[in-house]
Image (cartoon, rainbow, N blue to C red):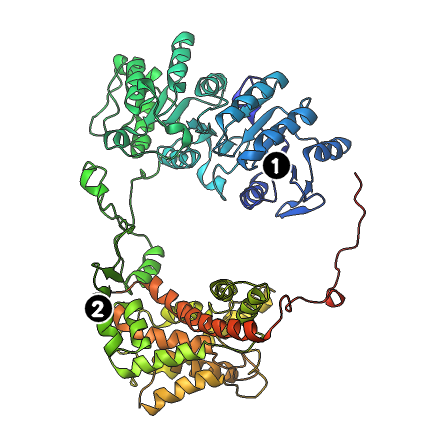
Amino acid sequence: MKAKSLSDLLKKGDRIAVSNITGREASKVSEDSQKYCGNIVAGWALGKGGQKLETSRGKIPVFATFEELMKSMKTKKKAPNKVIIYSPPSAVYGDVKAVVNHGAKCIETIFIITEHVAIEVTAKIRFLCQEAGIDVIGCNTLGIINGHDKVRVGAVGGSTPQDTFVPGSVTVISNSGNMVNTIASYIKSSGMGTAFGISSGKDTLILTPLKDLLALALKDPTTKLIVLYIEPGGVYEHEALAMLKKCKATKPLIVYVAGSIAERYDISLGHAGAVVEGGQTTASAKVAAFSEYFGGEPFDTEKNYKPTDKLKTQLKRGILVKTLHDFPRAVEMVATVLDIKRDLSVTSPLQLNPWFVKLDELGKILPPELALGPGTIPKPYSDQIKQYTQLGASFGRQKMRNTSHASSNDGVTPRIYGYPVSDIMQSCSFSSSIILSWTGELPENPFEEKLVEMALIAALTNGPGTISAQGTKLSTSAGNSPNMAMVGTLATIGTVHGGNGAKAVNYLLKIFGQRDFKDPYDTNLNVKSIAHKVAEDFKKKKMAAKEAAIEYAKIPCLGHPVFRNDPVNYDPREQIISNYIKEKGKVNIFLEFYHHLVVALKENGSMPKVMAVNVDAAIACVWLGVCWRHLKAKRMTVERIRDIPFLAFALGRVAGGAAEYLDHQDFGTQMDMRIPVSECKELTKPRDLEI
């Protein structure tokens, strides 16, 4: 290796360049890293040259290629000496080769974040970088953090690394990147901070293996104790132990080998490099190898350790732990016995406190110490979770390839939730059949059946200019078949067009979800006072957002692009549904709330007019009324009722789309939906291609 110590891999003053920096993960991690340590000087991404990535510490320049980046940075005397590769697997070799070709004289280390890089490609990268004298960490590394210099590369530590990594005497080396964070949190509670946190990666071929990282850690003056997280797969640990024996290392190791239980119960670990190939690569073989090196039993939480000479001799090499959450007490014991000074005050030991436990079949085969029960959820999360768990059901997951609750067929009789389709055909309307199909039960009364039918009809069309109608007409104009034209309708329905009903349900559940009423048509509930309180809260949030010059959260399903200019606005389709409810001497609590809300928003000055309650709100309120009893009885999930209004809109609109197909097929001409060239506006100046 070119590096002679851990600080050579990363230290204060290193300048980082990032490949594919405009990608989703790379841009987010780069922003967080700049906020923490500001060590990224540039990035590159194909086709994105000239752009800049905004961060809290200024803009990061983006170049089209690494060659362009180096030419520009050299002239400014800010050339990078480290590179992070965030490229897709197919592009990793090309980016590494570019770094070697154009940066070999100044690049010291390459960190390859990308996982699932082909082993043949990884081997080529190793040879290429060895020839150039460049160290490579990865593939599939999460990065490295230097606790003393407070710098990092990659995503180690998440968005707030300072919360987890305080300067200290422990170096953490882990196959899993996320476990670096977890272990650093654990050891803090034992009074020890982090010197370095290193994610070695766990693709099939690890380019900087454990023995090389350990050799650097042994030379690092800030490292007094080394913690290892090991996974099955590969023989890197056996090589590392041979190196430790040869150099007679004296820095203690505290080691956890994952995968023993997975091995016992035939459960696979997720990393590509964790695949077991041969006896030496199993978790149990690695446990045996470390046990032989340490020459003692694994750490026992029930044992009272006394600092005898025999124990000191063993702990100079180290000790195994049986579970992750044994790390704090094991680190504390080793530090005490070997007189290693604490880095910070000891806090309460960390303990596993699972908020939710849903082991299902796995719970039957796990040992009792791992099949934990649910713990205590701290505030404010407990209150938030309670809000969503009190309403609606939670069902166990299962394989559903050839099974269904919604339908069945014994070879003779198809059924919907147990009812023969032939009986439904004779006795039920289409709308009541839809209620059965989506809720699992027939409607309680003809009133709900009629409301659902009206909602379906209301969704049929909003004219040929609607984007869903345009989708059908475009598809027909292109010569597609009926089913593809209907797919065109569905493809142009989304969270903005049609999906507002789902947003309305979510909004209404936040307001009414914890209220104790079973009948959604109860006229005794004071909906008006609820609406006025909600309107006042909205006004405060809107004013605060405007003062801060930020966007405020809109109320879903208010307003309509056509029905908006009168002092009091109505969507006529919603009014038909509302009037029918009144004619039957009932009230839909949710729709009534919307009516009072638009008036209250006008009265308190939040809105200049009484806005229309649109048809998406009506559909959402109708279906929330139908499903309310199922939600309260925990026969239906909250997720299902969020989806149903969207499905109801889509079902009605796709039938309307079929009408547009038939009409366009009869009377339209092929390709007649094209926009003439004369109407198209050019926003980019013409350019000549220079080859």
SS under mark 1: strand
| Residue 216 higher or lower than 675, as above or below | above
Q: Nearer the viewer, residue 606 or 470?
A: 470
Q: Nearer the viewer, residue 165 or 207?
A: 207
91 on left or right of 74: left
Q: What's the residue at 32%, 20% (across, down)?
A: 286
Q: Which residue is mark 1?
A: 19
SS under mark 2: strand
Quarter residue 503 falls in: bottom left
Q: Amino acid at mark 1?
A: Ser
- Mark 2–mark 1 Cα distance, whole angstroms, equals 60 Å
438 on left or right of 609: left
Q: Position of residue 337 (x, y in %)?
A: 31, 21
Per the rendering, the mark at residue 420 is 2
Q: Position of residue 14 (x, y in %)?
A: 62, 30
Q: The C terminus lies in which quarter of the figure? A: top right
Q: Position of residue 565 (x, y in %)?
A: 59, 85
